[in-house]
Image: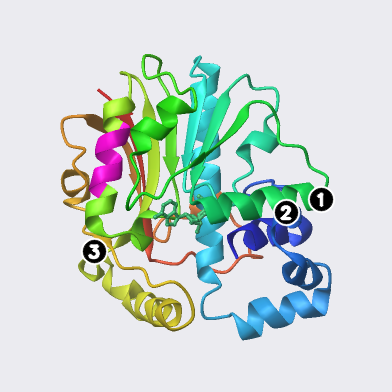
Amino acid sequence: MVAAARAGHFARGERPLVTEDPYAIHLAGGRWRRVIGSSWRHWLVTRVLLRKVIPTTTFVLIRTRFTDDRVLAAAARGVGQLVVLGAGFDTFALRHPDLGIRVYEVDLPASAALKRERLAGADIAVPEHLHFVEVDFERDPLDERLLEAGFDRGAPAFFSWMGVTYYLAPEAVTETLARVTGLSAPGSELTLDYMNAREGVPAEELALFDSLVRFVEKHGEPMITRFDPGSVVNRMGLTGQWDVLQHEFPAADPGPYLGGRTDLPRVAPLFRLLHLRRT
Ligand SMILES: C[S@@+](CC[C@H](N)C(=O)[O-])C[C@H]1O[C@@H](n2cnc3c(N)ncnc32)[C@H](O)[C@@H]1O
């Protein structure tokens, strides 16, 4: 659904787009391609069948833009390594072939295999600067696997961890971040999203929050780990190691991403975004 959100936005969204992903349609799968390719099917799926969960797709577009802008700024400053943790159908490496940045896509073996299969099916070659690194955050030593793949711990890197923390046990989140911290040279950056604890949700957003949580629990992968915005940096073990550059709640302040556009559903009040720099 994440690739489908980006593909649907690219095919049907009002210009200028929040994020431009011409590759997502090739990764989204045949069923989604048929939905996106037909006005009435797209309307039926997004406005009727999936209407309860569709606000999460607006957040997907925002988190992609949030990271893209920061990675591009870091690359312009000379950062030459991007680690996409839980990469899924991320397409940064395909969309920016000439940036001179090595991209490490970290994911479960099955997810990486599906991505390779879909890329091959669409005749999209894996670029030389893209490296697949197979890791299960719940079990495997992320740092060892990245170093084996050629990651340079002496040089600054950009780490992005979007769309994953809520699916893991809290210990796996802190363990993974400890390994990221251990690999990060000063000046490295990190973006991630996390799910709000219910207590961190403004009263006016609670009804939508509860209905989205119910829907996801019933139909999707349960989101098991949530954080309170006031203590999240500490609980993730980042205090003292990373400076917080941004901490955003796009549901409350979508303006910088959405402007006055009316073609997208309101942003799901489930998630917040963090951007940090290694001290
Ligand atoms: C919702 S997708 C997010 C994809 C992408 N980062 C984005 O923002 O669109 C979640 C990804 O996390 C990966 N993932 C989930 N649990 C994982 C684990 N224990 N270890 C490694 N990757 C995991 C999944 O395979 C999937 O590719």
Q: Residue at x 16, y 51 (%)?
A: 231
Q: CA distance from mark 1 to mark 3?
A: 42 Å
Q: Which residue is mark 1?
A: 122
Q: Which residue is mark 2?
A: 118
* Mark linked to residue 200: 3
Question: Is-magenta flag for residue 179?
Answer: yes
Q: Residue at x 36, y 14 (%)?
A: 154
Q: Is residue 56 above or below residue 82?
A: below
Image side of residue 279 versus residue 50, left or right? left
Which quarter of the figure has residue 126?
top right
Image side of residue 118 versus residue 232, left or right? right
Q: Rate crowding at label 1 as few (under 14), some (14 to 19) or many (20 or more) other CA atoms within 10 Å.
A: few
2 and 1 marks in contact (CB < 8 Å): yes
Nearer the observer, disc 2 or disc 3? 2
Q: Rate crowding at label 2 as few (under 14), some (14 to 19) or many (20 or more) other CA atoms within 10 Å.
A: some
* Label 1 secondary element: loop
Amino acid carrying label 1: it is Ala
Amino acid carrying label 2: it is Arg
Q: Residue at x 41, y 25 (%)?
A: 147
Q: CA distance from mark 2 to mark 3?
A: 38 Å
Task: Say which label, 1 or 3, has the lower sequence index.
Answer: 1
Q: Position of residue 120 (x, y in %)?
A: 77, 47
Q: Position of residue 159 (x, y in %)?
A: 42, 34
| 58 or 106, nearer to the observer | 106
Q: Is residue 125 visible?
A: yes
The residue range painted magenta reads 174-180
| Label 2 CB less than 8 angstroms from ligand 1 | no
* Label 3 secondary element: helix
Image side of residue 28 versus residue 138, left or right? right
Q: Quadrant of the N terminus?
A: bottom right
Q: Position of residue 64 (x, y in %)?
A: 54, 47
Amino acid carrying label 3: it is Gly
